[in-house]
Image (cartoon, rainbow, N blue to C red):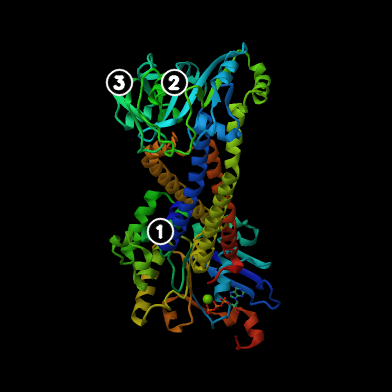
Amino acid sequence: MLFSIAWQSLLNRKVSVALTLASLTLSVIVVVGVEHIRSQARASFERTVSGVDLIVGARTSQINLLLYSVFRIGNATNGISSESYELIAGDPRVAWTIPLSLGDSHRGYRVLGTDSNFFEHFHFAQQNSLEFSQGKAFSSAFETVLGAEVARRLAYQLGDSITLSHGLGEISFSNHESTPFTVSGILEPTGTPVDRTVHVTLAGLDAAHGLGPHEDTHQHDDDSGAEQHIDSDEVTAFMLGLHSRMSVFEIQRAINEHAGEPLLAILPGVALAQLWEVMGSVESILALISALVMLASLLGIATMLFASMRERQREIFLFRSVGMHSTSIFFLIEIEAILITTLGIGFGLGVVWVTLSAGQDWLSQEYGLMIDTLPLSPSITAYLGVILIASLLLSLLPGVAAYRSSLGTKLKF
Amino acid sequence: MTYAIECQDIIFKWPGSNSPVLEINEFNVERGERLFLYGASGSGKSTLLSLITGLLHSREGEIRVLDKDMSKMGDRAKDRFRAQHIGFVFQQFNLIPYLDVESNIGLAANLAGLSKSETKQRTLTLLDALLIDPRFQSQRADKLSIGQQQRVAVARALINEPEILIADEPTSSLDEEAKDEFIELLLKTQQRTGASVIFVSHDRSLMKHFDRTQSMTDINRVLAHRGSHVI
Ligand SMILES: Nc1ncnc2c1ncn2[C@@H]1O[C@H](COP(=O)(O)OP(=O)(O)OP(=O)(O)O)[C@@H](O)[C@H]1O
Ligand SMILES: [Mg+2]
């Protein structure tokens, strides 16, 4: 009965309730949206690479090396000479290596020159290996394996022929048109940058650059990209796996102190954590802002209820005269607060859900974020619980005011 | 004769005030009696009614309602008692404006523990007796005319068939002809259950409808001390 009275009472104050509700809904959107995107981004982020013990590149910052080798963001300033690469790859403690040669693109997607070790040893998420949805790994120099998104967006199928562009722009000055690659395989979606990568053989890449087995008159336009072009006797970076993880620090140190050229070896997990920390301060500022926005809305609810007390003196007196207890009057106000808060949470979640459902494709295409559209992780559920409790606590103010004015000596006849 | 209401040696002060507003040696209302209570504004009529109905509590004296000592009842018991045994009609704004007629009456019935089906039936009978079209049941209370609201208030006051009906200036918002008509309807409806009525007004032209007339100045000794002068 109290619920129905509270509900009617709210309906009776449509405008002020609607405004309060709108403010709360917006706050819920901010809180839930920020938290959801954050946790999803983090999960998506952490699954980008696993099972790789070290990533090695020319000396630069940890984060830069991680960004270009794993996220295909930014550029390497230098490559690694094949002598150094072979020396490290030949170390008896090293089980396997995956060479990475970057710098070209295909219609806006980055091209990765590598070898078949990539499909065998690269893992993501919880030690998931790469799977082919169609076809298989390349078996000759002029074959290519496409990430799931590349194939889907550009509508490529097995057997299609593609050409690479030098540099990274969507429209490039120089196309390696004389050396087309045939699609030999398409990978399953992974939710990692692999989906947005065109994988080719190192030999094929060299040929496209006019350095390999094919004679090529094509001239490189060195102004087309700021990045230094990687020569055939170089790789941009490589990943390696060890027979025993015990030796990882030893090898890392050896590589970092390598006499031939300045190199950097990073542990992917450590570098990922460091990169995430860079974003950490942004994260906590966002969390603080959303908490304040929420507090403002909850105060709005309390204010709205408090302001209504003046016009409700008569109502309270009538409730009491027909035998309603003072504590029921208190609960009536609290129920109104719960109703508004629950509605605000419901609307907010709804809006976030609809928006994420609509924006899901865009997020995965633009940012490679694979997100859950239902924003109900344990942390969000906990936040919503806190919001409800905070709303109840703040509404103690108007609730107690209502209680007090329902006592005999405060009743107005 | 048994009494519906017995008041003995009441002295009531509002909190924060030194001088009492009520000092009553004895004030009784018989069962089934219709009492007309009048007195100047501020003479303590509403205060007395609040004491009798347990909305206010007097430290001194004894108030027995239907043979129950009000001062011995707990807060919840008093609220329950009021819901079941006492009906109210006030001057105006008797109804919760945003609830419909049915819910306004239903609320009082619910607080007294009346079953849903019984409530429905009694509501129809009462509305009929009070000349209110049953279609008004789903109408919001504040959409009714003042006269209609007052009659719905009577229906609400009587839904639990209370032994006591308190009417605190229920006619002062009505015009002259409507006043007598309203009182006649009220008393006719009350007759079916034989509830005691305390009808408060300063309009003495209405006293012809009642069994007995009581002036506040005769029972409230505070007024005698002060003489006739009331602030
Ligand atoms: N809630 C309150 N707190 C303090 N004093 C009050 C309160 N209500 C009434 N009084 C005082 O108690 C006295 C009696 O008031 P009461 O309302 O009982 O008079 P009344 O006879 O019903 O008057 P009226 O005919 O105007 O309704 C008045 O002096 C009034 O100022
Ligand atoms: Mg009065």
Q: Judging from the image, what secondary structure is the residue with disc 1 in?
A: helix
| Quarter of the picture holding the N terminus of chain B | bottom right
Determine whether, in the image, residue B138 is placed left or right of residue A301.
left
Q: What residue do we see at 65% from left, 26% from top?
A: A256
Q: Position of residue B9 (x, y in %)?
A: 67, 71
Q: Is residue B6 visible?
A: no
Q: Callout 1, which amino acid?
A: Leu
Q: Residues within 10 Å of mark 1 (few under 14, many from 20)?
A: some
Q: Are marks 3 and 2 on the same chain?
A: yes
Q: Residues within 10 Å of mark 2 (few under 14, many from 20)?
A: many
| Quarter of the picture holding the C terminus of chain B | bottom right
Question: Gap in Å between the C-alphas at discs 1 and 3?
Answer: 61 Å
Q: For residue A202, which numbered disc appears in the image?
A: 2
Between B61 and A335, the one nearer to me in the picture: A335
Q: Which residue is mark 1?
A: A11
Q: Are marks 3 and 2 in contact (CB under 8 Å)?
A: no
Q: Nearer the viewer, mark 3 or mark 2?
A: 2
Q: Judging from the image, what secondary structure is the residue with disc 3 in?
A: loop
- Earlier in the chain: of badge 2 and badge 1, it is 1
Q: What residue do we see at 46% from left, 50% from top?
A: A344
Indicate the quadrant where residue A201 lies. top left
Q: Is residue A106 above or below residue A382?
A: above
Q: Position of residue A390 (x, y in %)?
A: 58, 50
Q: Position of residue B4 (x, y in %)?
A: 54, 64
